[in-house]
Amino acid sequence: MRSASDAAPARLPGKARLALLLAALTLAAGAARAEDLYVICNSGVSLQAADVRDVFIGEKGFAGSVKLAPADNASAQAGFLARALKLDALKYSGIWTKKSFRDGANPPPVKASDAEAVAYVRQTPGGCSYVTTAPGAGVTVVAKL
Amino acid sequence: MPAPFTPLLRVLALGLVLAAAPALGADGESAQLAEMQKKLDKSLAMIEALAKRVHELEARQTGASVAQAAPAPAATEAPRLEAVEQRVQQIETANAARRGDDTSLPIHGFADVGAGTANPFTNELKGAYVGNLDLYLTPKLGEHTLSLFELNFEVGTDGAVGVDLERAQVGYQFSDAATVWLGRFHTPFGYINTALHHGNWLSTAVRRPKFVQFEDQGGVLPAHTVGAWLTGSTHAGDGKLTYDLYAGNGQEIIGGVLDMRNAGTVHGNPMVGGRLGYKFAGALDGLTVGVHGFVDKVSDDQQPADLTRVRMLGAYAVYDTDTWEHIAEFYAFDNESLAGGTGTHRSEAGFVQLAYRLPRGAVYGRYERASLQQSDPYFAQMTSVDSGASYYRTAVGLRFDVDLKTALKLELANTHTTDRLVNDYNEAMVQYAIRF
C-alpha cells in the first residue's frame, strides 16, 4: 500500500494556483516597471524642470549667465529620450544633425554610465545629465521622472 | 544537512515557472496547470540535485582550506577589491572629464546622386547626375566661441566639378538672446534658406523651389552674405521670439549670376536685412510665422553697369510636426533702377509646400510661382540657368527613408515659363541622398 509520501507531490487547489500565478505575474510586471530617472546639473546651475527638453535639444544654451554643457548617459538614454523629450533615438539624432548644420552647435558628449555622468556633472561648470540612481551630494536634481 | 538556500530556490523556481507561463484561459486551465506542475516538479528535482552538489563542493573546499591553514579569503581579497574599486573610480572620473568633441574634429556631411528626365536645375540636361558632396565642420573653440565651415563639391551644368566655401563663419555667443557671427553665412530670409540649405538629405523634397535655388543654380535671391549677423531668441508668451539682423557686402551680378563678393566690393555699398519670427508653443507647437526683408544696391558687369536698389519684403510660415511639414514663403520686390533710369519695378515670388509625414518618409506637393519684371535690370541680368525668368511650377513627390541616414526621393513636376521663352515641360527625377 502506498503511503501519502509515496504519492505524487501534493497539488495546490486550482484557485490557489491561479492566485499564485497572478501574484507572480504582478511581481514580474513590477520588475519591468521603468526605473527612476534623475535629471541632474552642476550645483552652480539654476534650471527649471520645464527647461530640460530645450537644454537637451540645443534650444537653451544658458541658465542665467552660465553656459550649459549637457551630456547624454548611454546607460539611461533610451528611457530619458522617451520620458523627458518624447523622442526616439532616430528623431533625437535627426534634431542634432539639423541643429549642428544650421547653428554650428555640437551634440552633447555621451557618458557611459551613471557614475561617469555624475562625475561629469560634478566637475563641469554648466554640466547637466541624467542618471537612474539617486546621485548623492554635489549635484542639483533638476527633475525626477 | 540540506543547503540553506534550497527553500529560497524552490520559491524562486516556482515564481519563474509561474511567471513564464502564459495567461490561462478558462477552458485549458486544468491541462495547463497539470503541465506546469510537471515542469515545476522537474525543476525542483534538478534544483535539489544542484544544491546537494554545491553543498558537497563547499564542504570539500572548506576542508581543504583548513588543512592548508590558508588565510581567510576575505582577508586577502579585501585590499585587492579596494584597489580595483579605486581604479574604476579613477577611470570613471577620467572619462567624465572628456568632452568628446574637444579632443577631435568630427567631419559631417551630406551627399546625393540622382537621375531623371531632367537635371534638377535645368531641363536641358537628362539622365544621371552627380549632385553635391557637402562637408561641414563645427570645431569647438571655447565656451562662448562657435565656428562653422562648410565646403561643397558640386557639378555644374557644364559637367565640371566646382568647390565652394559655402560657409566660413566664426561667432561669439553672449547668451541665448544674442550670438554674433562674422564671415560668410546663409542669408537669413524665409525658412528653407537657413534650415534646408545644402544637404539634400535634410529636405523632404528633391530640390528647392527654383527662385530660391542657390545663386548659380537658378535662384534670384542672395542665398549667401559676407558680413556680420546678429541672431538670437527669447521667450515671449508661451512661445519664442526669434530675430536676425545682418549687414554685408552689396551683391553684384557677374556673368549672369548673383555674387556675394567674398573678398569685398569695389563700390562699398552694404546690404542690410533682417528676419523676425515667432515660434508658437502649446496647441500650435510646431508653427512658426515671420517676416523678412533686405535692402541692397546691386550692380552688374554690363557696360555701362546697371545699379539697382533692391528692396525685398516678405513673410513666411512653417508648420513642422510629427505629422505635417508645411512651408510657405512669399517675397515682394520693389526695385529701383539707379543707373539705367528705367524707374521702379515690382515683382513677386512665392511657394507653398504641403507634406504629410509617413512612418518612414513623407509625401509632398508644392506650388511655386515667380512673376519677375524683365524690364528690371536686377532680374534681366540674371541669365545663368534662366534664373531671372518668370514661371510657375507644380510638383508632387515622395520621400522614403531607407534607414537612419539614407533617403530615396521621387519627384514629378510640371513647369511653365512665361516670359523670356514661353515653354511647358514635365520632369521626373529620383534622388538618393545620404548624411554621414
Image (cartoon, rainbow, N blue to C red):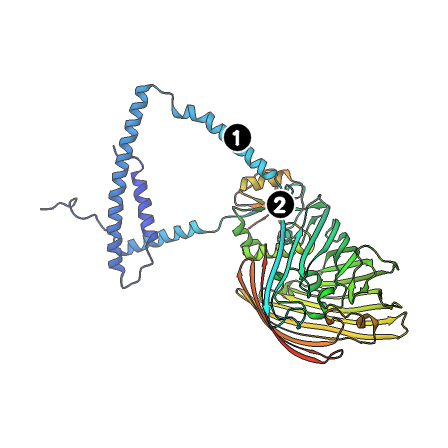
Q: Is residue A64 visible?
A: no
Left of B198 or right of it: where is B256? right
Can you give x and y, in whole percent of width and height, for residue B76 in the image?
A: 42, 24
- The local secondary structure at tag 2 comes to strand
Amino acid marked by disc 2:
Cys
Q: Which mark is residue B86?
A: 1
Q: Report how many numbered discs are placed on residues in the image.
A: 2
Q: Which residue is mark 2?
A: A128
Q: Nearer the viewer, residue B54 or B358?
A: B358
Q: Residue at x 29, y 34 (%)?
A: B54
Q: Nearer the viewer, residue A31 or B376?
A: B376
Residue A24 lies, with reference to residue B80, above or below; the image says: below
Residue A116 lies, with reference to residue A145, above or below; the image says: above
Residue B305 lies, with reference to residue B101, above or below; the image says: below
Q: Which mark is residue B405?
A: none
Q: Residues within 10 Å of mark 2 (few under 14, many from 20)?
A: many
- The local secondary structure at tag 1 comes to helix
Quarter of the figure with the N terminus of chain B: top left
Disc 1 to disc 2, C-alpha distance: 25 Å
**Picture quadrant where residue B351 is located:** bottom right
Q: Is residue B192 visible?
A: yes
Quarter of the figure with the C terminus of chain B: bottom right
Q: Nearer the viewer, mark 1 or mark 2?
A: 1
Q: Residue at x 76, y 63 (%)?
A: B276
Left of A99 or right of it: where is B270? right
Amino acid marked by disc 1:
Gln
